Image (tube, rainbow, N blue to C red):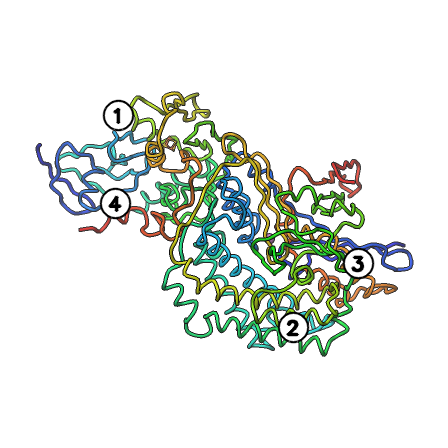
C-alpha cells in the first residue's frame, strides 16, 4: 500500500507550511512536496489605494520581513514619482534607507541563525527534541543565546531610528525618507555601552563565523552533503559586481558559473522572469524565460548572492568571502547547508555597512526627498534577507494603484526548497517503514536552510489554484472542483 | 455679558452666560472629549462623545449653554464607558485600518481609542463595502474612514466660501461629496485646510503622506486632551 507521510506544521520556519511525502509500495520516496496552505490577498487588497500608501500598507503582509517590503515598495514608487531608481535619490534618502535595510538584514539573519538554525547544528538532526530548540541553546550555550538577543536588539534599534518603529514603520516615502538620524543616535550606535555598539556587533559577527567554521570542520558530512544539489543562482549585484543588498542590476549564473542573466535592468524583469502556478501549492514557481519552465528555476538568498557577486565591498566580509569561494575552488556552491555560512558572512558585512553608514555625514543633514516627472509604472527590487524581492506597481490617472505584482524571496526559492525536501526525504526515509523524529526533522532542516518566510510567500489572492470540495458526513468527497493551476 | 456660577467636577467657576459647558470647561483646563466638534464652527452635538452629567441628566457639553447654579460632572465610570462604546461603534461601523492610514498618529478617532484603551472590539465589525473617490486633482475622499461628523460641511457653510462639501444619499447610504468644479483650482494650502478639518483620514491630500516620522506626530507626543487638561 502506498503511504503518505504528512509533517505539519513545519516548526521553526517563519509562517506555516505543510510537507507531504509520498511513498510507493516499497516504501521508497516517490515524491515530496512543500505545500503552502495559507494565502493573503495583498495584490488585490492594494488595488484602488493611493499609491503612496503602498510602502506602509504592503509591509503588513509579513510581520517577519516588513522592512524589506517597505523598502521594495518605496523603490518602485521612486520610479513612479520620477525620482529614478536607487541612485536617483538624495544622498540622505538613499543612505538612510540603506541603513534601515542593513539593520533589517542583520537582525533577520541573526534571528535565523541563532534561534532557528543553530539548534539543528548544536544538537544534531537526531538530537534530543527537548533540547533541539532555542530553549536548549539558552540552557547549554548561554553565551550564544545572549549574543543573539543583543544582536537582534541592535538591528531593531537601527530600524527604529530609521523607520520610526521596530516593526511596521513609515520611514521610506516615495522619493526618499522622512527623517534624519540624530547625533544622539549616532553616539549611541557608535559608542554605546557594551554590548550595544557597532564594534561589538562586528566582533560578535566574526565570532559567529569562527564558530561555524569550527563546526563545519568537525561535521563535513552534514554541512557539505546534506541536501546539496546543483542549480542556477540569481541576485542583484552592484554595477561593478560587488555585493549590494539594496540596489543593483539583476545577475544570474548557471551551475558552471556561466552568466544566464547578464546584469540586466530590473525594470524589465518581466522580459526575463515568469511564474508558473501548480495546483498543489498556493506558492507560485518562478523561472527564467530564456531557459524555460522545466529547468529555468533558480536559487536566491545568501548562498545565491555569494555565487553571483565578484567581491564584497567591506574588508572583513571580503576576507571571509575569499575563504568561502576557495572552498569550492571558485565554482558555484550548491550545498544547501552552506546557506548558513553565507548568511553569517552577510551578518558581518551588514555590521560593517552599518558602521560605515552611521559615520556618514549625509545621514545627519541634507534633503530628504526628490521628485521628477511622474510615471505610471514602477518596479522596485532589493535583496531581502531571504533573497531577491520584486515589487511592481501600476497606477491610474487618479493616483490609485491599478495593478500590483509581488514576487517574494521565498517564492523565488520554491523549486529549490522542494528539491531540498525531496533530497532530504530520499536520504533519510528510503526503505524505512518507521517514521522517526530525526527523519522528519531532516526534512525540516532542509527547508529551514532556506529560511522560508511562508507568511509572505502566499499573497496572491485571485491568481492561485483553489481546490473546492464538498464532503459528506462520512468524510467522503461528493463533489470537487479545481480552479486554475495545472 | 452676564456671569453665572457653575460647578464642574466639584469646583465652582464664574462663567459667561453665553458659553457652552464645553467652552467653560476648556477655559478652565478641564478636558471633555469631542469628535464632531471643532473650534470655530457651530456645535451640533451629533457624536455624543462629550456627554456629561448636567444637573443629573446626560447631556452633550458642546451644545448645552451654562446656567446659574448648574452642576456638571465630566467624568464617571459610566460616562467613560459610554464614550468608549461610542468610539468602538464608530470603528465597527466603518473600515478603519490605522496601520496604513496617513492620519495615524494624527487622528482624533484613533487618539480617543488610545485614551479609552480600546484593545479588543466588543461589537461585530460591519466591514461595509465603500469606495474611494480619487478623481479630484488635490484631494481624496476615502469613504471607508468617514464618520459622518459633518465637520467639513459645517465649516464651509460658515466661512464666506461657498459650500464645498455636501451629504448625498440617505440613511445607511449617506456619504460625503464635494463640488469638483468649485474646487478645481484649489491650491495646496486649501487642500491642507480641508484635510485638517476632518478628524479622521476621510479627506486626505494627494501625493503627500507619512512625511512626519513616527514619534513626532501629533498624538505620539501628547495624548489627546493633554493640551487642555491640567494647564492651570
Ligand atoms: S469627511 Fe471627515 S469631516 Fe467630513 S463628515 Fe466625514 S469624517 Fe467628518
Ligand atoms: Ni516575510
Answer above or below: position of B162 versus A471: above
Q: Nearer the viewer, mark 4 or mark 3?
A: 3
Q: Is residue A448 left or right of residue B87?
A: right
Q: Nearer the viewer, mark 4 or mark 1?
A: 1
Q: Residues within 10 Å of mark 4 (few under 14, many from 20)?
A: many
- Residue sitting nearer the eye, A87 or B67: A87
Q: Residues within 10 Å of mark 2 (few under 14, many from 20)?
A: some
Residue visible at 57% across and 68% down? Answer: A348
Residue A170 seen in this snapshot: no
Residue A438 appears at what percent x and percent y? 75, 68
Label at residue A422: 3
On what subunit does the disc labeled 2 rest? Answer: A
Q: Secondary structure at mark 3?
A: helix
Q: Which residue is mark 2?
A: A131
Q: Which residue is mark 1?
A: B158
**Sequence order check: which comes first, mark 2 or mark 3?**
2
Label at residue A122: none
Amino acid at each position: 500500500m502506498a503511504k503518505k507521510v504528512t509533517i505539519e506544521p513545519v516548526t521553526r520556519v517563519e509562517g506555516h507550511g505543510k510537507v507531504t511525502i509520498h511513498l510507493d509500495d516499497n516504501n521508497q520516496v516517490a515524491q515530496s512536496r512543500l505545500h503552502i496552505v495559507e494565502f493573503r490577498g495583498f495584490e488585490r487588497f492594494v488595488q484602488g489605494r493611493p499609491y503612496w500608501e503602498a510602502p506602509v500598507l504592503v509591509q503588513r503582509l509579513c510581520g517577519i520581513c516588513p522592512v524589506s517590503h517597505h523598502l521594495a515598495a518605496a523603490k518602485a514608487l521612486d520610479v513612479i514619482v520620477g525620482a529614478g531608481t536607487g541612485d536617483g535619490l538624495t544622498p540622505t534618502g538613499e543612505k538612510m534607507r540603506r541603513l534601515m535595510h542593513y539593520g533589517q538584514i542583520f537582525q533577520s539573519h541573526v534571528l535565523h541563525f541563532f534561534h532557528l538554525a543553530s539548534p539543528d547544528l548544536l544538537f544534531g538532526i537526531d538530537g534530543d527534541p527537548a533540547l533541539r530548540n532555542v530553549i536548549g541553546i539558552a540552557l547549554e550555550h548561554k553565551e550564544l543565546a545572549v549574543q543573539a538577543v543583543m544582536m537582534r536588539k541592535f538591528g531593531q534599534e537601527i530600524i527604529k531610528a530609521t523607520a520610526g518603529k521596530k516593526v511596521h514603520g513609515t520611514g521610506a516615502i516615495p522619493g526618499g525618507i522622512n527623517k534624519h538620524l540624530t547625533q544622539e543616535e549616532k553616539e549611541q550606535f557608535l559608542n554605546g555601552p557594551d554590548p550595544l555598539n557597532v564594534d561589538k556587533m562586528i566582533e560578535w559577527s566574526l565570532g559567529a563565523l569562527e564558530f561555524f567554521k569550527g563546526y563545519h570542520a568537525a561535521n563535513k558530512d552534514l554541512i557539505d552533503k546534506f541536501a546539496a544539489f546543483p542549480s542556477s543562482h540569481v541576485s542583484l549585484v552592484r554595477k561593478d559586481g560587488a555585493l549590494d543588498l539594496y540596489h543593483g542590476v539583476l545577475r544570474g549564473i548557471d551551475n558552471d558559473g556561466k552568466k544566464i542573466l547578464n546584469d540586466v535592468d530590473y525594470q524589465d524583469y518581466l522580459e526575463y522572469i515568469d511564474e508558473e502556478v501548480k495546483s498543489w501549492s498556493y506558492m507560485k514557481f518562478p523561472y527564467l524565460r530564456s531557459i524555460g519552465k522545466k529547468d529555468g528555476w533558480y536559487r536566491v538568498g545568501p548562498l545565491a548572492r555569494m555565487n553571483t557577486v565578484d567581491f564584497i565591498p567591506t574588508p572583513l566580509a571580503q576576507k571571509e568571502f575569499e575563504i568561502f569561494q576557495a572552498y569550492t575552488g571558485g565554482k558555484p556552491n550548491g550545498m544547501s547547508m552552506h546557506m548558513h555560512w553565507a548568511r553569517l558572512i552577510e551578518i558581518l558585512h551588514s555590521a560593517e555597512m552599518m558602521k560605515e553608514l552611521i559615520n556618514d555625514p549625509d545621514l545627519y543633514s541634507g534633503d530628504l526627498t526628490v521628485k521628477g516627472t511622474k510615471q505610471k509604472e514602477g518596479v522596485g527590487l532589493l535583496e531581502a534577507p531571504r533573497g531577491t524581492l520584486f515589487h511592481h506597481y501600476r497606477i491610474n490617472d487618479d493616483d490609485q494603484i491599478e495593478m500590483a505584482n509581488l514576487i517574494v524571496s521565498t517564492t523565488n526559492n520554491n523549486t529549490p526548497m522542494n528539491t531540498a525536501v525531496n533530497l532530504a526525504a530520499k536520504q533519510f526515509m528510503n526503505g524505512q517503514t518507521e517514521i522517526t523524529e530525526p527523519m522528519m526533522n531532516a526534512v525540516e532542516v532542509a527547508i529551514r536552510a532556506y529560511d522560508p518566510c511562508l507568511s509572505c510567500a502566499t499573497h496572491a489572492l485571485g491568481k492561485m489554484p483553489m481546490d473546492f470540495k464538498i464532503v459528506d458526513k462520512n468524510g467522503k468527497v461528493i463533489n470537487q472542483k479545481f480552479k486554475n493551476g495545472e | 455679558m452676564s456671569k453665572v456660577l457653575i460647578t464642574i467636577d466639584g469646583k465652582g467657576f464664574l462663567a459667561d452666560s453665553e458659553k457652552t459647558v464645553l467652552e467653560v470647561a476648556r477655559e478652565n483646563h478641564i478636558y471633555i472629549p469631542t469628535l464632531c466638534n471643532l473650534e470655530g464652527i457651530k456645535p451640533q452635538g451629533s457624536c455624543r462623545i462629550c456627554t456629561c452629567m448636567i444637573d443629573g441628566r446626560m447631556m452633550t457639553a458642546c451644545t448645552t449653554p451654562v446656567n446659574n447654579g448648574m452642576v456638571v460632572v465630566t467624568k464617571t465610570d459610566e460616562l467613560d464607558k459610554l464614550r468608549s462604546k461610542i468610539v468602538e461603534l464608530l470603528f465597527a461601523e466603518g473600515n478603519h485600518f490605522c496601520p496604513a492610514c496617513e492620519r495615524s498618529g494624527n487622528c482624533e478617532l484613533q487618539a480617543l481609542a488610545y485614551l479609552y484603551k480600546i484593545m479588543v472590539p466588543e461589537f461585530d465589525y460591519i466591514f461595509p463595502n465603500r469606495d474611494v473617490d480619487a478623481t479630484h486633482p488635490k484631494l481624496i475622499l476615502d469613504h471607508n474612514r468617514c464618520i459622518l461628523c459633518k465637520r467639513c460641511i459645517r465649516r464651509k457653510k460658515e466661512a464666506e466660501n461657498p459650500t464645498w462639501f455636501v451629504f448625498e444619499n440617505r440613511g445607511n447610504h449617506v456619504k460625503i461629496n464635494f463640488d469638483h468644479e468649485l474646487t478645481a483650482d484649489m491650491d495646496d494650502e486649501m487642500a491642507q485646510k480641508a484635510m485638517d478639518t476632518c478628524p479622521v483620514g476621510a479627506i486626505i491630500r494627494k501625493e503627500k503622506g507619512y512625511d512626519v516620522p513616527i514619534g513626532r506626530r501629533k498624538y505620539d507626543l501628547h495624548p489627546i486632551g493633554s493640551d487642555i487638561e491640567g494647564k492651570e
